[in-house]
Amino acid sequence: MPYWPGFQGHVARRQHAAGAQIAFRFNSFIGLALAERLAGPQGLLVIALLIGVSVPLMNIGAVWPMARHGQRGFLGELVRNPLIIATAGGLAANLAGFAIPHWAEPTVTRIGGASLALGLMAAGAGMQVTALNHAKLLAVAVLLIRHLLMPVWALALCHLFALSTVQSTILLMFSALPTASSAYVLAARMGYDGAFVAALVTASTVLGMVSLPFALGVLRSFV
């Protein structure tokens, strides 16, 4: 983005390093809840596959520019990233055939259900709406990518790969999700402008109420 025509010299590299993750990260908790309601167990399988593959890749993409601009060790930041550790551990446990004991499921389910609210509360606590003024052009650009260009690109992929109805529905929903609330936590932990990222997270959460109906209503009619 800092190299795009019209953006050169108007986007601070450090702000971009922290804010770029808003354009491609996603709120997996909202995605899981919607997938079940939209497509039942089959939809859950599809979204679980998307999340399992995407979370490590998205977190690597989020950590790398901040580690580079902050002169931190990239590999060190990766191995300390709790989302990457949790996802890799979950995939390893699944491949090894492990399962959560039935007696632990109610507790784990409640903890998982609370994580979305706690993540949004953390972002909201650090939010200052005026922080979007720190980089207005960057904020508009990453939010447009997240909530407009991503759903349109998802529609193109649905046609390109001739996806089934369930697959198309989940992909369109996935592309229009609000960004991850943990983006704020990651930026603040690595010493970046946490207030700016928190404001972006909150704006993305609000815009998700527009992009999701757009993707699932308007764009899905073209599948």
Image (cartoon, grey):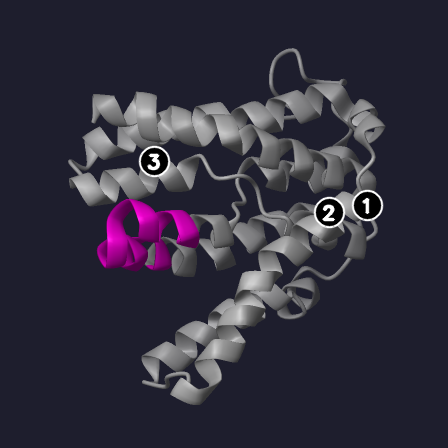
Q: Name the image quarter holding residue 203.
A: top right
In contact (CB < 8 Å): disc 2 and disc 1: yes
At 43% from the left and 49% from the top, the residue drawn is: 31
User: Label 2, on which residue?
Assistant: 123
Above or below — where is 176 with respect to 34?
Answer: above
Helix, strand or loop for disc 2: helix
Place of residue 137 in the rendered image (x, y in percent of width and height, measured from the top left): 70, 19
At 82% from the left and 30% from the top, the residue drawn is: 131
Q: CA distance from mark 3 to mark 1?
A: 30 Å
Q: Earlier in the sequence, mark 3 or mark 1?
A: 1
Place of residue 32 in the rendered image (x, y in percent of width and height, measured from the top left): 41, 54
Above or below — where is 92 with respect to 18?
Answer: below
At 76% from the left and 34% from the top, the residue drawn is: 15
Residue 146, can we see it?
A: no
Count neighbours of disc 3 (C-alpha within 10 A) and say few if under 14, some if 14 to 19, many if 20 or more: many
In the rendered structure, does residue 38 fall within the stretch colored magenta? Answer: yes
Range of magenta residues:
32-48
At 57% from the left and 55% from the top, the residue drawn is: 60
Place of residue 28 in the rendered image (x, y in percent of width and height, measured from the top left): 48, 52
Helix, strand or loop for disc 3: helix
Lateral position of residue 41 relative to residue 182, left or right: left
Q: Earlier in the sequence, mark 2 or mark 3?
A: 2
Q: Name the image quarter holding residue 174.
A: top left
Q: Quadrant of the C terminus?
A: top left
| Amino acid type for the residue under numbered disc 2 | Ala
| Amino acid type for the residue under numbered disc 1 | Gly
User: Label 3, on which residue?
Assistant: 172
Res. 126 mark: 1
In the rendered structure, does residue 174 fall within the stretch colored magenta? Answer: no
Q: CA distance from mark 2 to mark 1?
A: 5 Å
Q: How many labels sit on residues? A: 3
